[in-house]
């Protein structure tokens, strides 16, 4: 799962799907009886104290910080409306944090914040909403036990009280219809799910090995070793490079900047806004004034070359670099430029989300 505040804005805005990653081990799979289900509280709708035999339930997990979760709200609501009387929808708020990426001390503040969020999104969330406890117990016994490390994620409980399907809520329409109609082949579903899990486990092991190699190469400042190692992160060259540089920032910010400077404008699929995002990570990940300034200079060049469709993002990231340097007035100038460029952002359907993101960043800059 992506950390709460390290989400790329491009991904947060544009990704309608966020396939949950699989952990290396899992003990809960399709065909198993449902784990215990005892929410800390109920934020909306009629509480479900126990799963009744003969009824179908959808148990979905989400958090207020999760962009793909928010994007799934309307679809979940439409499904809940469509399947009324056939399936009960329960959305569990878990792994939740505030805007600083932290859990509030005590449950009351968390409950109040989530309640406010639900009220603001009431018409988009037309289903029952439960609250996990401070220890994220339900997420542990359901999500973690099933090897799911990403949200949103949904489980369908069949009429026999068994887990019949696990996956992204945007992909559950057909399975849910077949399960409610009593036509679902749970044995075949289990075979496929377990095979996919095994493949994902092997992929995760290979990725972990590649991540170690990337970290070692970055720490050593070895460009050749770094380029060889990132190939193991993803078959997509652009994605592999972005992930590799992001990892390098944590290990050796100066080397990350060296890689960025060498690759900028030379890799297909990486726009100026993405480079500005990486450079922002470098500037915020070091206290070296010279490195920060070099990152700022490269970022300014990127903003100047940004496509009008993504200029608002590039300008926002650059503003954060300037803020990291203590240049608040200049940072505000670029936030103003970012706001003005929202009207040219594509896809147009995401302009509202982008605008809200920029407003949040503007508030953090003072």
Image: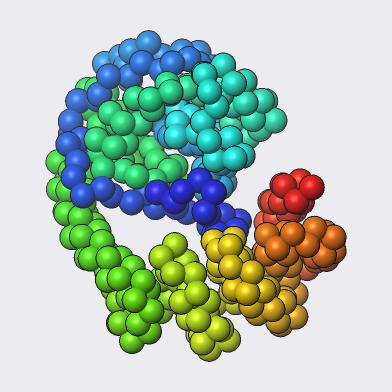
Q: Position of residue 265 (x, y in %)?
A: 58, 86
Q: Position of residue 211 (x, y in %)?
A: 30, 65
Q: Position of residue 355 (x, y in %)?
A: 75, 53
Quarter-wise, where is residue 278 in the image?
A: bottom right
Is residue 33 left or right of 254 when viewed as pictured? left
Q: Residue at x 47, y 21 (%)?
A: 130
Q: Position of residue 58 (x, y in %)?
A: 39, 30
Quarter-wise, where is residue 167 in the image?
A: top left
State the residue in front, 109 or 127: 109
Q: Residue at x 64, y 69 (%)?
A: 289
7 to 99, vertically: above or below: below
State the residue in front, 103 or 218: 218
Q: Residue at x 78, y 62 (%)?
A: 327
Q: Residue at x 42, y 21 (%)?
A: 133
Is residue 229 left or right of 258 when viewed as pictured? left
260 to 139, vertically: above or below: below
Quarter-wise, where is residue 38 in the image?
A: top left
Is residue 302 left or right of 6 when viewed as pictured? right
What's the coloring here?
rainbow
Q: Is residue 30 visible?
A: no
257 to 24, vertically: above or below: below
Q: Is residue 350 visible?
A: yes
State the residue in front, 253 or 273: 253
Q: Total number of numbered labels?
A: 0
């Amino acid at each position: 799962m992506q950390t709460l505040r390290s989400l790329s804005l491009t991904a947060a805005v544009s990704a309608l799907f966020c396939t949950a990653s699989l952990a290396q081990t899992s003990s809960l799979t399709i065909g198993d009886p449902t784990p215990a289900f005892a929410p800390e509280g109920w934020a909306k709708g009629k509480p479900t104290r126990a799963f009744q035999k003969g009824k179908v339930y959808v148990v979905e997990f989400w958090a207020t910080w999760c962009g793909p979760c928010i994007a799934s709200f309307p679809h979940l609501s439409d499904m809940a409306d469509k399947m009324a009387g056939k399936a009960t929808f329960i959305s569990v708020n878990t792994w939740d944090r505030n805007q600083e990426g932290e859990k509030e001390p005590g449950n009351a503040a968390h409950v109040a914040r989530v309640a406010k969020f639900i009220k603001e999104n009431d018409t988009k969330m037309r289903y029952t909403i439960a609250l996990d406890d401070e220890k994220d117990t339900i997420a542990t016994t359901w999500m973690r036990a099933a090897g799911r490390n990403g949200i949103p994620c949904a489980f369908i409980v069949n009429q026999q009280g068994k887990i019949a399907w696990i996956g992204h809520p945007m992909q559950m329409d057909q399975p849910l219809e077949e399960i409610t109609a009593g036509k679902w082949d749970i044995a075949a579903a289990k075979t496929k799910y377990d095979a996919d899990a095994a493949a994902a486990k092997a992929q995760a092991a290979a990725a972990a090995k590649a991540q170690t190699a990337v970290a070692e190469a970055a720490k050593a400042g070895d460009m050749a070793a770094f380029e060889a190692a990132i190939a193991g992160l993803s078959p997509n060259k652009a994605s592999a490079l972005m992930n590799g540089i992001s990892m390098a920032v944590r290990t050796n910010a100066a080397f990350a900047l060296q890689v960025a400077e060498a690759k900028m404008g030379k890799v297909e699929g990486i726009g100026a806004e993405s480079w500005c995002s990486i450079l922002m990570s470098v500037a915020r990940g070091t206290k070296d004034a010279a490195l920060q300034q070099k990152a700022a200079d490269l970022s300014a060049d990127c903003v100047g070359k940004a496509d009008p469709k993504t200029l608002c993002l590039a300008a926002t990231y650059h503003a954060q670099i300037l803020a990291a340097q203590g240049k608040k007035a200049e940072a505000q100038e670029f936030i103003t430029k970012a706001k003005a460029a929202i009207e040219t952002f594509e896809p147009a359907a995401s302009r509202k989300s982008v605008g809200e993101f920029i407003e949040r960043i503007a508030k953090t800059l003072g």
